[in-house]
Image (cartoon, helix red, strand yellow):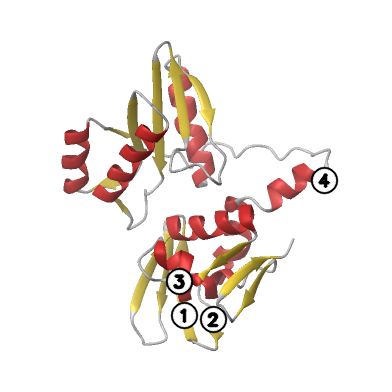
């Protein structure tokens, strides 16, 4: 199950409870994956598929969800996950009135059937979706050593929570998938993402993010300033 499929799975859970469901686009969603409507309720739902990974729900995620809830004028916020929730996240969620819902991802459910699309636009949307890019171009980097003028990164693991690597200084490190999603969404919507932008929105892992994403054939690396360009 991919993160997008998990979002749909969570949405279906609320649909079965009688809610009208709206899945948000994969880019520009401000951290909300599903809106659920019923009478006077408008629920902001964030789905975190962290099961079978080392990634955990932390308090920052809860606080960001609270901000998105207020931005979209929702009556309630829910974080749905199949992973572990840290104690500080539970504490903040309780204080803010955010519900944490454990919904296990079922890996045995059939994947959606691939349909024949009729327009070039639909084909492009599928090709350049975040999930497709991650599966087609990032997963195969596991076990590879990447080089550029700034050094090397050895990719030791890739999963749906992020990437583990050994940096050019020989340190073990991990970049979570949200950082890559942020950078890719910026590329898909604005055709460019800079090192400075990534640094402003993450924990200063921009060089690693740019090196890894430069392996995607339609993300072109430019050195001065250091940035990626979406070439399609």
Q: Quadrant of residue 44?
A: top left
Disc nearest the viewer among 3 and 4: 3
Residue occupied by mark 2: 146
- 3D distance between C-alphas at marks 4 and 1: 37 Å
Question: Of the residues under marks 3 and 4, which one precedes in the sequence?
Answer: 4
Tags 1 and 2 touching, CB below 8 Å:
yes
Q: Is residue 43 left or right of residue 131?
A: left
Q: Secondary structure at mark 3?
A: helix
Q: In percent of the image, x 55 and y 85: which residue is there?
A: 147
Would you call the spot at circle 4 few (<14 residues within 10 Å), some (14-19), or many (20 or more)?
few
Residue 103 visible in the displayed image: no
Which label was assigned to residue 154? Answer: 1
Q: How far apart are the alpha carbons under marks 3 and 4?
A: 33 Å
Distance (Cα) linking label 3 and label 2: 15 Å
Crowd band around label 1 with a 10 angstrom C-alpha radius: few (<14), some (14–19), many (20+) = some
Front residue (pair 200, 95): 200
Position in image of residue 34 (x %, y %): 47, 32
List x then y, in percent, for residue 141: 55, 71
SS of the residue under disc 1: strand
For marks 3 and 1, give the CA distance.
Answer: 16 Å
Q: Is residue 146 visible?
A: yes
What is the CA distance from the residue labelled 4 to the residue labelled 2? 33 Å
Q: Which residue is mark 4?
A: 120
- Compared with residue 66, is residue 150 higher up or lower down, i.e. above or below? below
Q: Position of residue 97 (x, y in %)?
A: 22, 30
| Residue at the spot 42% in from the left edge and 16% down from the top edge | 17
The residue sitting at 26% across, 32% down in the picture is: 98
Q: Residue at x 43, y 55 (%)?
A: 178
Q: Secondary structure at mark 2?
A: strand
Report the disc number at residue 206. Answer: 3
Comes first in the chain, label 4 or label 2 = 4
């Amino acid at each position: 199950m991919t993160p997008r499929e998990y979002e749909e799975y969570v949405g279906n859970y609320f649909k079965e409870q009688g809610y009208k469901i709206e899945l948000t686009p994969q880019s520009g969603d401000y951290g909300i994956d599903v809106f659920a409507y019923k009478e006077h309720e408008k629920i902001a739902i964030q789905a975190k598929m962290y099961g079978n990974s080392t990634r955990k729900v932390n308090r920052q995620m809860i606080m960001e969800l609270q901000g998105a809830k207020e931005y979209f004028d929702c009556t309630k916020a829910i974080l749905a996950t199949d992973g572990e929730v840290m104690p500080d996240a539970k504490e903040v969620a309780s204080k803010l009135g955010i519900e944490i819902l454990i919904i296990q991802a079922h890996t045995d459910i059939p994947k959606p059937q691939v349909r024949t699309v009729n327009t070039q636009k639909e084909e492009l949307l599928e090709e350049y979706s975040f999930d497709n890019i991650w599966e087609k171009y990032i997963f195969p980097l596991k076990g590879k050593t990447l080089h550029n003028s700034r050094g090397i990164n050895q990719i030791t693991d890739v999963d749906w929570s992020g990437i583990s690597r050994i940096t050019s200084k020989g340190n073990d490190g991990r970049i979570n998938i949200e950082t890559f999603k942020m950078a890719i969404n910026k590329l898909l919507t604005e055709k460019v993402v800079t090192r400075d932008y990534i640094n402003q929105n993450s924990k200063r892992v921009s060089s690693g993010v740019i090196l890894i994403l430069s392996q995607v054939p339609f993300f072109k690396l430019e050195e001065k300033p250091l940035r990626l360009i979406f070439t399609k």
